[in-house]
Image (cartoon, rainbow, N blue to C red):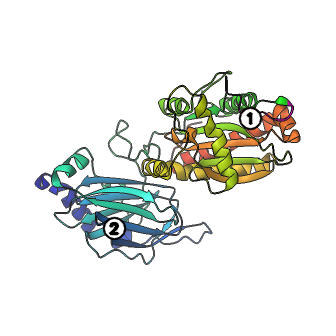
């Protein structure tokens, strides 16, 4: 079996012998004052359970995203996506089972070939360290028979195809296999030369038999969320005509949480935005917007919001998932690590729009275990517009003017992200 995979390893060794050393070691920092991601060390340690090893990429901040491929049992390929990665003085590993690591400077970040010792048989899983910025590759002992099924359908990334032709030159992360080629990574949307940000899924929270929270004067959350969702959609249609808007509901109907994510996935959405209104009846003076992305709730208030939004499951007919465990989130991160990172970035843009442009009191960007976000396999946010238990905010969010302002804040964040996304993908448009 291994004899049939030798050409892959041979190609990797051949490429490394041809590439100049500057491509293998260093990204020279720019004189411009732009925040950089520093990678100063790659280390290898044996796992505590004795089932394999962990390769750790020691990073100063998390990359925008990453992809991992294993085209052979002894070759793992990693791509780190970030605007700038400083690898000055990078220390490479010299421990079992790694034989050699080679880095390649690319336009969107850095690529790595991790060559393992011959006769090695490991499967690989990747995930970000929950407590640090590091990226971890978990190697698990396997067998030749099991490994053949892992890499038999995986084509290697040929880094030389991505090089511009001059040492240190910038390159595009675009597959050379044509427009019908499979995406390089499911975790980082689709990286192809002709790919654009073209579908936004807008989810109006609650609806039908589920009114959501009941606010001051008997106002129902479901009516506010539907109205704001439609206004966001109209802003997008009017100003971003190349973006398709998909609603999980466009009238007063009840849609199960899992179904909302399924609709988003079916539409092949590039972004999922779930719109809600908050409540704190114990204190009618509490106010402000909150932007959430999927993760462990890190505050009591976030935990309470999560419990309230997930309680919708009790109204569903099936056996819905009403609480996410740490294991559920780990599984999600392994499959969607890039989506979580991107969600956090968009959440920051949206929080800025609420605070600086809409002039609304902001309670910040937070994480929580929202079921509705868990089912959407794309960057996903949950927006709490304000507290309808606060009389002033209830009146504001019920007014046409107030709804226009908060909808505009959501739209502006989406527009900014779309522009940055397409710029990073080197997409140009003919006017």
Mark 1 residue element: loop
Q: What residue sits 37% from the left and 61% below the top?
A: 137
- As rendered, which of 165 and 396 lies closer to the eye? 396
Look at the numbered discs 1 and 2 and tell me whether their residues touch, using CB distance below 8 Å: no
- Tell me, yes or no, whether the highlighted magenta stretch contains residue 211: yes
Report the magenta residues as a range.
209-217
Q: Which quadrant of the figure has residue 221? A: top right
Report the residue marked by disc 1: 213
In the rendered image, is residue 232 in sight?
yes
The percent position of residue 367, horizontal first and vertical second, equals: 61, 52
- As rendered, which of 344 and 181 lies closer to the eye? 344
174 versus 269 height, above or below = below
Mark 2 residue element: loop
422 versus 232 height, above or below = below
Q: Which quadrant of the figure has residue 160? A: bottom left
The percent position of residue 306, horizontal first and vertical second, equals: 63, 45
The percent position of residue 192, horizontal first and vertical second, equals: 42, 43
Of marks 1 and 2, which one's residue comes earlier in the chain?
2
Report the residue marked by disc 2: 47
The percent position of residue 290, horizontal first and vertical second, equals: 71, 48
Quadrant where the C terminus sits is top right
**Real-space Cα separation, disc 1 to disc 2, in angstroms:** 47 Å
Q: Which quadrant of the figure has residue 20? A: bottom left
- As rendered, which of 407 and 375 lies closer to the eye? 375
């Amino acid at each position: 079996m291994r004899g049939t995979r030798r050409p892959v390893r041979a190609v990797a060794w051949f490429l490394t012998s041809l590439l100049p050393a500057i491509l293998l070691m260093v990204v020279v920092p720019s004189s411009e004052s732009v925040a950089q991601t520093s990678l100063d060390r790659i280390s290898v340690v044996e796992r505590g359970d004795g089932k394999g090893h962990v390769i750790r990429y020691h990073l100063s901040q998390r990359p925008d995203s990453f992809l991992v491929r294993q085209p052979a049992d002894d070759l793992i390929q990693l791509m780190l996506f970030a605007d700038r990665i400083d690898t000055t003085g990078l220390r490479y590993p010299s421990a079992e089972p790694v034989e050699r690591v080679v880095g390649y400077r690319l336009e969107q970040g850095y690529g790595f070939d991790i060559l393992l010792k011959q006769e090695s048989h490991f499967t690989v899983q990747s995930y970000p360290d929950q407590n640090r910025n590091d990226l971890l590759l978990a190697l698990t002992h396997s067998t030749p028979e099991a490994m053949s099924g892992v890499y038999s359908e995986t084509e290697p990334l040929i880094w030389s195809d991505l090089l511009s032709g001059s040492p240190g030159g910038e390159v595009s992360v675009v597959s050379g296999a044509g427009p019908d080629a499979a995406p390089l990574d499911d975790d980082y949307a689709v990286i192809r030369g002709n790919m654009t940000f073209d579908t936004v899924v807008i989810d109006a929270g609650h609806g039908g038999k589920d009114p959501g929270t009941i606010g001051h004067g008997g106002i129902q959350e479901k009516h506010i969320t539907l109205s704001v969702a439609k206004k966001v959609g109209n802003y997008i249609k009017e100003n971003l005509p190349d973006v398709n808007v998909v609603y999980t509901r466009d009238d007063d109907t009840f849609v199960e949480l899992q179904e909302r994510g399924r609709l988003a996935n079916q539409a092949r959405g590039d972004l999922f935005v779930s719109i809600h209104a908050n409540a704190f009846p114990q204190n009618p003076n509490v106010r402000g917007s909150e932007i959430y992305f999927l993760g462990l709730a890190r505050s009591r208030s976030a935990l309470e919001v999560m419990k309230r939004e997930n309680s919708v499951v009790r109204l569903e007919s099936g056996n819905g998932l009403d609480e996410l465990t740490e294991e559920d989130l780990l599984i999600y991160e392994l499959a969607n690590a890039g989506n979580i990172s991107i969600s956090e970035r968009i959440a920051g843009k949206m929080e800025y729009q609420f605070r600086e442009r809409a002039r609304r009191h902001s309670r910040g960007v937070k994480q929580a275990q929202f079921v509705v976000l868990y089912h959407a396999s794309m960057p996903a946010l949950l927006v709490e517009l304000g507290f309808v238990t606060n009389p002033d905010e209830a009146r504001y969010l019920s007014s046409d003017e107030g709804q226009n302002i908060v909808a505009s804040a959501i739209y502006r964040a989406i527009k900014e992200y779309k522009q940055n996304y397409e710029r990073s993908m080197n997409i140009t448009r003919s006017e």
